[in-house]
Amino acid sequence: MAERLVWTPADGSPPLDLSDESAGFVWQAEGTRGLRSVVYSFTSQSYAGIDGDEVQAVRAEANHPSIGMLVRARNVDEFRARTRALVHALRPKAGPGTLTVTTEDGRARRLVCFYEGGAEGDESDETTMPGRWWKLILRLYAPMPWWLGDPQRVELGLGAPTTFFPIFPLVLSPSTIQGQFTVDLSDTDAPAYPVWTITGPGSSIELTNQTTGRSILVDTALGPGESMRIDTRPGARSVRRLVDSPEGPVPGELLTGALQGDPALWPLIAGVNRVTAALAGATADSRITGEFEPRYAGV
């Protein structure tokens, strides 16, 4: 089939190409479900004497896609090795893996999910020929239902800014990083949550989404080479200084008390976002960097 499916195990072992026929793995349309859209649920209220319901909230349910698979081999030993490799790569106790679907035009989207079932084995004639082939349907569970697109990045500084689609920064002052840029997420289906890294020297960091009117202001100072991170991702929201380590910068002191603006730490909406960023007292070594992953309902 045209789309390539790759499973990346949670334990860091090599990815398993579920569409590599030379390795005996073939994914099939039969049994494959849930790749095109999430499922939505509604919270509603009805009132006496009023027709219909009032919708109060819409949410995307956890994703439960399934993948139809055929495992083939030339002999019993090869069959056992391939099925064992598949089951081992999928094991959920190692943590969530990542299913990556790549289309013919090279676009890739990723779903972080657990293997839920389907590879237990059915020895009936319709699903297997011992030592030769095995038909199965892998059932997956994604607590966070959205498919992630390629990571996007923007960097602002006093020198020439590095730009990445779809962002266009402007440097407006020789002593203050004060940029404005547009992030067009009109083709996405859910908000994206950026991680901002600010490298000093500088002070009074301000990030504003002009489209939504929400601002983040951190009233703190960074010395030369010092840095901090504003993480807006659900479950990881925080404002921290970064501390150098042999593995690179790691989160350090919480700066919650220095947060003057939006305590919820705003996201980028699924639409056009006009964003401004400012850092006072900057030099040529100062930087504001933003990174995020677009979110989609399906591949």
Image: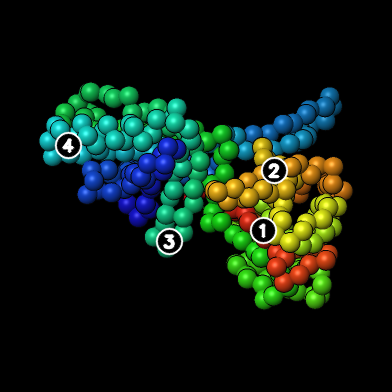
* Amino acid type, mark 1: Gly
Instruction: Tell me the quarter of the picture where residue 51 sits.
Output: top right
In the rendered image, which residue does mark 1 sit on?
A: 290
Residue drawn at point x = 39 percent, y = 60 percent: 104
Q: Determine whether 81 is above or below 266 in the image.
A: above
In the rendered image, which residue does mark 4 sit on?
A: 78
**Are dots 2 and 4 in contact, CB under 8 Å?**
no
Label 2 or label 1, whichever comes before in sequence order? 2
Q: Nearer the viewer, mark 2 or mark 1?
A: 2
Q: Nearer the viewer, residue 73 or 175?
A: 175
Label 1 or label 4, whichever comes before in sequence order? 4
Residue drawn at point x = 62 percent, y = 38 percent: 60
Q: Is residue 286 left or right of residue 87?
A: right
Q: Nearer the viewer, residue 194 or 134?
A: 194
In the rendered image, which residue does mark 2 sit on?
A: 252
**Are dots 3 and 4 in contact, CB under 8 Å?**
no
In the rendered image, which residue does mark 3 sit on?
A: 106
Q: Residues within 10 Å of mark 2 (few under 14, many from 20)?
A: some
Cα separation, mark 1 vs mark 3, equals 24 Å
Q: Is residue 133 left or right of residue 47?
A: left
Residue drawn at point x = 72 percent, y = 31 percent: 43
Q: Residues within 10 Å of mark 3 (few under 14, many from 20)?
A: few
Cα separation, mark 3 vs mark 4, equals 31 Å
Label 3 or label 2, whichever comes before in sequence order? 3
Label 2, secondary structure: give it: strand
* Amino acid type, mark 2: Gly
Q: Is residue 210 left or right of residue 140?
A: right
Q: Determine whether 285 is above or below 248 in the image.
A: below
The label number, if any, that marks residue 160 in the structure image: none
Label 2 or label 4, whichever comes before in sequence order? 4
